[in-house]
Amino acid sequence: MLLRLPGKRPVAASALLAALVAGFTHCLGSALAGSQPFGSMNRNVNDLGTQFVPFHTYLWDLLHGRADGGWLINWQTGYGTSFLPDLGTYLSSPFALLVAFFPRERIDLAVYVVSVARIVVAAAVMAWLLMTMRPKGRWWLAGTLGSAYALCGWAVIEASYNPMWLDGLIAFPLLCVVGEWVRAGRGLRVWFVGGVLLVALVWTANFYTAYMATLGAGLVLGARLLMEGGPRPLRTAVRACAVVALGIGLSAPVLLTVFAGTRHAYPGMGLTFRPAGWGEVLARLIPGTYAFSSPAMYVSSAVLVLALALPFHRGVAVRVRAGWCVLVVAVLVSMQWGPTHLAWHAFAEPNGSPYRQTFVLSGVLVMAAWAAVSGGAPGRRTVAGAAGCVVLLGLAGLGSASLGRWAWLGWGAGLVAVAGALVLLGTRGPVRPAARRWCVAGAAVLLVGCTVGQSALTTAWAAKRRVATQDDHAPYGERQAVQRAVIADVGGWPRWRTDPGRTQTVHNDAMVVGGQGASYYSSMTSDVLTRTLTALGDGWNGSGRAPHSLDNPVTDAVFGVGARLRSTYRQGRDTEFEVVRGQAGPLVGIRAADGPVAYGHSAFANQELLLGAQVYERLRGTSGACTPGAPVYVWAPGLKGTARLAGGPAVRFEAKKGRVRAPMQGVGTAPADGAVRVELRGTGARGAEVACLREDRLTAAVRELRAAEADTVEVGDGTVRARWARGRAADGTAVLAVPRIAGWRCAVDGGELRPAGAYLGLVAVPVGAGVREVRCAFRPPGLRAGAVVGAGASAAVATVAVMGALRRRREGADPDGAAPSTGDGPPAPSGPLASSVRSAAPVPAARTGRPYTDTGRAEVVRPAR
């Protein structure tokens, strides 16, 4: 029969329909916008271009054995950074591994395809959840609602350029499925073992959105227990908590490593939550809207109308109607109240868009819409009431800057389509079966069409607005290919570092083009790295989490940068690079035992302190006398303006209070008479310093460092081994030109590894006279504890599973040859009565006197007299 499938096929069909509609619609929206890969419009905005594409590129190199570094240490960024916290934050999803199957030069396409794949899977899982909640529901309607969830405003506006967030879009319905298993008590292997593994999977994939999804799934399970009851609700809640706890425990090796990385990360800029106005919030329910500081709550009008029809639908039990309505309102209000807003975000204020939990509200609305059809199609009065509520919500959003002509058009057309579909579904009276089937088919087309049209409009509008309002970064192209080839030609790691240059395509250039520079951008950027580079005159973006390349001869010497690229940047079109050879100090060398303790205020003095020699002629103020021909440097970290050496070009400084710090820059060379005068224009010039570099002194200082360098240095994934053929005559301190991030341990001459010391922010270890070998190894903080917790959780899951299997075997053993039992229920009957018992009709749950709510109707079926 049309739109009806036998057996278990409706579940698969609903998931397939949801996946196809979601994938097609998202690609259609990108094509309508002319966005890559369907057009020329760049989609690499903000963190997608500067973080996620580079991280996936580094993952590609790791999987193909081409990275400078490994799974523990990334040697390409930040002069050596811990990689496992980044892996757990951005790349631990199984979907991320799919990039390995694409050519490296098509990494942008790979990231896009992986994002679409996540949306497709989220749609299928939501459809599966809906059919699990009510197996006898219309499969095509479950598929339509599943696709609407995966195409919600949060997914296509917020998460589409934060790919790892899309794992949360999958996690929420998946965890709700686990809740349904626990509620139904479907066999220990299903609800316990399967549930624990799924929880572990989603928490490993992306712990941040998994946390929000877990909160949401807990609310849904609690609401379901209150609305529809069930045997022993307290036991069900305890079981659910046990499943979640053990699942999180299994993910502990990744989770605790990420938490430790967060604890050691630079704090960034603190923000204060300010809820959006309710008019703006309600306006975001309309398709085709875009804003950064309000929740992207759009979800297809098919969902919205059905959810708003629920309170008026008398075919659904009152308790079910009230429960879903209360849950929707509670989630919505919790997004606007400060304390619950923090609770949704793991009690840490988001550094960016403040409504990252919106996908949970979208999912709850979809479930409420599904509940609305559990009592049959809503009648015309119910549809009229729901449509009226949608109109009122739209009017409440009048005046919002997010709304435009296309938004109203998509909203109105969708509302008409959904109302027409529901009228067709609710057709009653003497209608021929064929005509009824055509009514159902027409309703399905209208509902699917509404979801496709509105979601494609929203996707296209968001793609255009993102490029217009946010920073965009050039995709992989000729510039990066040429830069990568140049770096490969001049590279000499670990004898010297090659810095990709201060003029970057993105902050994580080294992950894309190679080299071993200082620049780095991550939520896990260590506090030690940022503070050390800042003390040396470096600049940064992202409130301190995106340090720049220093591009200074003194710091290059200290960190062993022997080659540096310089270029201009014009949206990725320039492909000419100048290679600057520098005086590189050793990667591992020995300094005097009584070294300096801490940095001071002046970046010039701090560089000299770390170098171990005075190489600058520092001026009082912005004018003075220098050695003729000496390079002139300006350190003005707060300057937003220009610095100009008399007779030279203006050099731009771009500082923004709290967000961007300007780096030390060269402005020219001292004239023949040695008279230096620098003119500073703009704001924030207070405290600026000017100095001239004596290159002859720098050469002598590097020569002295080289005299104490190791004869051989071996670098691996998280390991550095340095050897000296002849021991030194005096005690000293072995210093690695690597930031002393937490996790480094060192040993001397085969001794026991101990936590490394610090030498002005670098890895250091005291050595005695005659030292022959220094060995250092890196273990990310939290990894050992995570492994212990994970092992304990694994043992607990295995123990419960084995005990359950033994119990089932004992219960199934019958000396008379009885058949083994299935699930957790009583043994299956055997013998001559078995066939008659199996053929007996099952007794409905309502015979117990409890309301039979599978269809949402509050009926009580009583035994016939």
Image: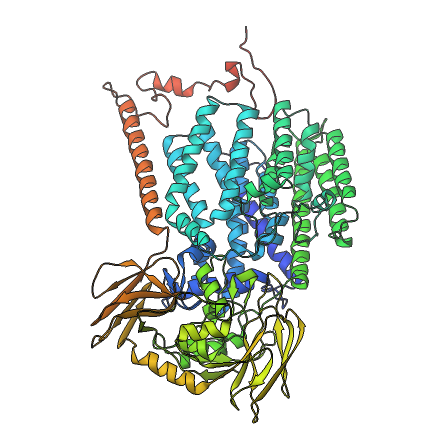
Question: Residue shown at 74%/47% (left/top)?
Answer: 411
Camera-side residue of 780 and 43: 780
Using the rendered view, name the quadrant where residue 648 is placed: bottom right
Extreme residue toward the front, this view: 620
The spot of residue 642 in percent (x, y) is 64, 76
Question: Residue shown at 54%/69% (left/top)?
Answer: 539
The spot of residue 781 in percent (x, y) is 37, 53
Camera-side residue of 598 and 347: 598
Residue 135 visible, this angle? no
The spot of residue 226 in percent (x, y) is 55, 25
Residue 269 visible, this angle? yes
Using the rendered view, name the quadrant where residue 24 is placed: bottom right
Camera-side residue of 74 and 472: 74
Question: Residue shown at 61%/20% (left/top)?
Answer: 858
Q: On the rendered structure, is 376 left or right of 615?
A: right
- For the N terminus, the image quarter is top right
Q: Is residue 40 above or below residue 441?
A: below
- For the C terminus, the image quarter is top right
Figure colour scheme: rainbow
The spot of residue 248 in percent (x, y) is 41, 42
Question: Residue shown at 51%/74% (left/top)?
Answer: 480
Camera-side residue of 555 and 121: 555
Q: On the rendered structure, is 195 left or right of 624?
A: left
Q: On the rendered structure, is 16 left or right of 410?
A: left
Q: Is residue 251 above or below residue 425?
A: below
Q: Is residue 775 above or below residue 211?
A: below
Extreme residue toward the bottom, this view: 672
Q: On the rendered structure, is 720 left or right of 154?
A: left
